[in-house]
Every structure is written in structure tokens, then in C-alpha cells.
Image (tube, helix red, strand yellow):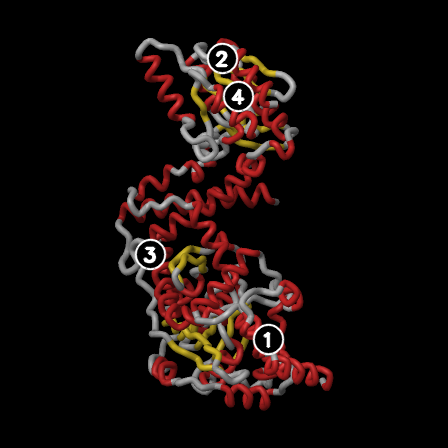
Amino acid sequence: MMTQKFRAFLARQATRISWPIRLLHGNLPKLDRLLKKELTPAQVNAVARGCREGGERFGAYYHWKFRQIALLATMSTLDRDQAIALVTKNDHSDYRPIDGALADSRGLLITIPHHGFYLPGIIAMSERLQAQRDVFVFYESPENHDTNAIFDMIHERVFGNGISKVSILYNNRIGLVRAIRELRKGNVVFILPDVAKRVQDTYRMPFCGMQRDFMLGSATIARRSNARLMPVVSQPGKALFGFSNLFADIVEPCATDGTAEGDLHADYRTTLAVMRGLEPLMTHHLVFWQYIHSYVAVEKEMEKVPTFDTISTELLLKDPYLNLLSSSPISV
Amino acid sequence: MSALVTQLFSSIDPLEPNLIVVPSTWAYIETAAKEKGERCLIGDIKLMPGALTPSQYLAQCAAREARGQIAQCAIIFTDQLVEPHVTPFLVQHGEKLEFLSSIEVLASTRYSVDLQIWMGRDWAIIPATEASRNQLKVLRALLDYLEACKALGSEWIVENRQWQRAEQARRKAGLARARYYASYLMQSSPNAPLTSKDMGILKELGACRAGLLQGYKEASA
């Protein structure tokens, strides 16, 4: 533990004294390797663009990565009381919106993207909410996504005392069924809506000035449990671990006619409303977004898509790319 | 090489209905543009400004036929044709499944165009009468032509687009398109349900997507 504490101390000090790195104009491949995130030229452009939108230089991306490393290193050395003290001291949120949301007895699905200090943000909200509702945090199991092991570990430290009402749900069939059941009972579930296991399962929607792929899972869960969605962003502050949870307006799941396509479109519209809620909270702070480097890849794909705002939607079905099934192989 | 290409083009009567299938090297493209004479060029207009697309050439053949004229002689860069609308023939050879163009078969069988296909060191000559009897022979010749193109190495300027012929690559592109189209369709009505017509299209896009995904998974397994 001593070594861990010393490493955490070093990480904090290194982050504090590395502030001038924010003045860097471009990327440093050696530093990328050190951070275990090597960037392709397209990703470098994406990060640069995200930084520019917030009026920052490229170096702000590195400094933010250092802050994240320092936070995780520190959190992993703390017991419950120390962790809660750290989070409380650094939390500058105005919780009136979430307190107001609890006036409704229906379940609340809190959609919080991988942005800023979402981990202390979730801890702070969970601590507050568990006084009134059972709280569940829904994410991919470490078995499927090994870097999530630290979330399990921190949960065990902070909420693993047996009297806590904050639990983990993994993204699998059992976790999904439980999330829906708990929301129907009026409880609270946290979900991270900006990540996807497979891009094939996503749909594209406008987000922060571009088209981006998102899963519709949060909307589906809300629709099936009649829960409301609350988009939240945990915005970092000026202090090393300072943050504010910022709340967008509550989103009600869109109504459906009950057909599969009706459900799909309702979930799409709900997800779009969630993303529209998150957009103004994130647009000028994209440097804090975990997926900032994915921008250009999405845009490049867009170039391949013919624009169809001027054509009839029926023509979409005539695209030969979609009619592969009609081809039987000719043996030569 | 340029002299050889010039010699080749001058040896084929530009007034006879021939489709001359050649590889995409700068030598062939530049010489073809310079020496084409009465012939037309077929291929990618980004590489050869003024070239016809396969469908434009076939439309021209039909118009000439209506006027009682034979088809125009053409130089075609078949290796440039990789997209689905021009490569509808899914061909299985060995364990490979690839899409090939259809213009060669259509031009020879429908408009009596003889085929002269570059094979590297020599040429495959398939008269229209033979192509009509044995279309597989044309497809085999096109596969051999593409193999010969591979042997050109760095001279072959369209090697980097050939992956699009693979069935799995096309399925993946199809999946992406089905997803984009469904997304944009739904995006077009962000605040209200879709019309029943668009709901029907969304349903069909979903069916396309499911079919493509199943095939993609099976082929990946």
C-alpha cells in the first residue's frame, strides 16, 4: 500500500508540475506510447480539433490524461472515508436538478458519458442518492473489458461495506433484466451512453457538430421500464481533482406504436434527445472526452455515404450494397 | 512499354467492334488517351477524365444498334471497376468469392463485341460468338487478367482498390450503409413518428441489415 501511495503522490506531483505541457501545439509520439495510447494521424487531427474547439492547445489533452492517471492512482489507495472526503472536497455541483428529479417516484436512468471526472462524479451522486433510492452502476464487466477492473475495485472500497445501497450491474442479459426491474421499482441506474461493443449495433446521430455512432441501449432500457433519463456531465474544474456534475433537462422516453420499427425510432429519438442535452455541456470541453480521438474516423466514413436529402427515401433500398443477398456465386 | 502499347492499339482496327481490356498502369492510361483515335475509353473518370462508365457505353451501343450501326470499339480498364453497380457477378474460384464486372459479358453477348483481354505476356481473344456460347470463359479470362495485373507490382495503380471485390468487404460496406440509411431516415423525423411509408423503408433496411449481418458472422466464423 505504501508503494501505491507513493506512486499516487508522484502522479499528483507530476501532474501539478507538468502544467506547462498544456502549451504544446502538437502531439509527442513518445508520450503517446508512454500513455499507452498511440494516435494515428487522423486521431491526432481529431484531438487537435477537439482542443481547438475549447480554445486549448494540443498539450491540454496530455495534461488531462495526467490528471486522470493521478486521480485513479489516488483513488485506488483510499478507503471509503478517505475517498468520500476527497470527492466531497472537490465536488462543486449544484444538486438541485437531481433532488428535483427525485420528487417523481419513477426510476431515474442517469446517462453520464466518459467525460471529465465521471468516476468521482458517479461516486458523489451515488452517495447522495443512496439515502433515498437503491443505486446501480451499469457497465461492461472486467471479464470483457479488463480496464474496468479498477471500477470494481473502487466500488468495493467505497461501497462494499454491506450497508451501502450502491451496486454494480454488468452489461449482460442478467444485468439488463435487473436494470429494468430496478428502474420499474423506482430506483436509480447510472449508464455510460457513449460506448459500444460493436459499431454494427450503433446508429448515427448529430453530436457536437458531427455525426457520431451511439448505442440506443439507454433509451431501450428507459422505454421498457418507463424510467426518465437524466443526462449528466462531470466537468473538471481548475483544481487538480475539482469537478462539477452538470445536469441537462430530464428526457422522457419517446412513445412507440409497439412495432419493432416504432420501438427503434422511439429509442433513436430518445437517444437523440439525450445527446442534445449533453451536447452544450461537452462541445467546448471535448478535450475531457475519452473518445475525442474518434472524430476523424467517423467523418471519413461519412465521405463514402451519398447525400440523400434531395432524393426520395425509397431509393435507399436500391443501393446495390444492400442487395448482396440476391447474388448467388457463379462457380468458374 | 509505351511503344509496345502504341503498337498494340495500332494493330487493332478501331472501326471493328472490339472491347480491349487493359491494365491500369500510367503507360497504358496515357497511351490509350493519346492513341485511342476512333475508340472510346471506359473506366474511372477520376483517373481518365472523359472516360465513359460501363452503363454509358452500353447505352451508346444500344443507340448505335437502333441506328443500324455496330458497336464502337473501346479500350476498357476493367481493373478500375470495383463498385457494386458495375461488378454484379459474384464468382467463386477456389475458396475465393469475388465480384467481377458485367460489361464484358453484356457487350459481347448483346452487342456482338469481340473481346481482347490483356494477360501479361499475351492476349486472350474471345470472339462474340464464343462469348455468347460460353460466358464462363469470359469470367475465367477476367480472373486471369486480374492475376496478371497483380504481377505488375507497383506499376499497377489500382491495386489498392481491389479489396472491394471481396464478398466480405462488400457485406461490411453494406452493413455500414444500412446503418447510415436507417440513422438518417430516423434523423429526418427527430420530433415525431415516421410516416408509414418511411416506417416501411426502415423495416426493409432492418431486414437488409439482419441478412447482411448474419452472412458477415457466418463468413467470419
> Can residue A169 be seen in the rendering of this structure?
no
User: Label 3 to label 4, Cα distance in Å?
Assistant: 55 Å
The residue pinned by badge 2 equals B114
User: Residue A214, relative to residue B7: is it above or below?
Assistant: below
Question: Looking at the rendered structure, which numbered label has been put on residue B21?
Answer: 4
- What distance separates the C-alpha of mark 1 from that of mark 2? 68 Å
Instruction: Give a yes or no on whether discs 2 and 3 share a subunit.
Output: no
Q: Quadrant of residue B95?
A: top right
Residue A309 location, x and y as percent? Answer: 30, 47
Spatial CA distance of label 3 from label 1 is 48 Å
**Residue type at the position of mark 4:** Val
Badge 4, how many Cα within 10 Å: few under 14, some, many 20+? Answer: many
Query: Which quarter of the figure is the C terminus of chain A placed in?
Result: top right
Residue under numbered circle 3 = A258
Label 1's element? helix
Q: Do marks 3 and 4 share a subunit?
A: no
Q: For the residues marked 2 and 3, what is the alpha-carbon distance in whole angstroms?
A: 58 Å
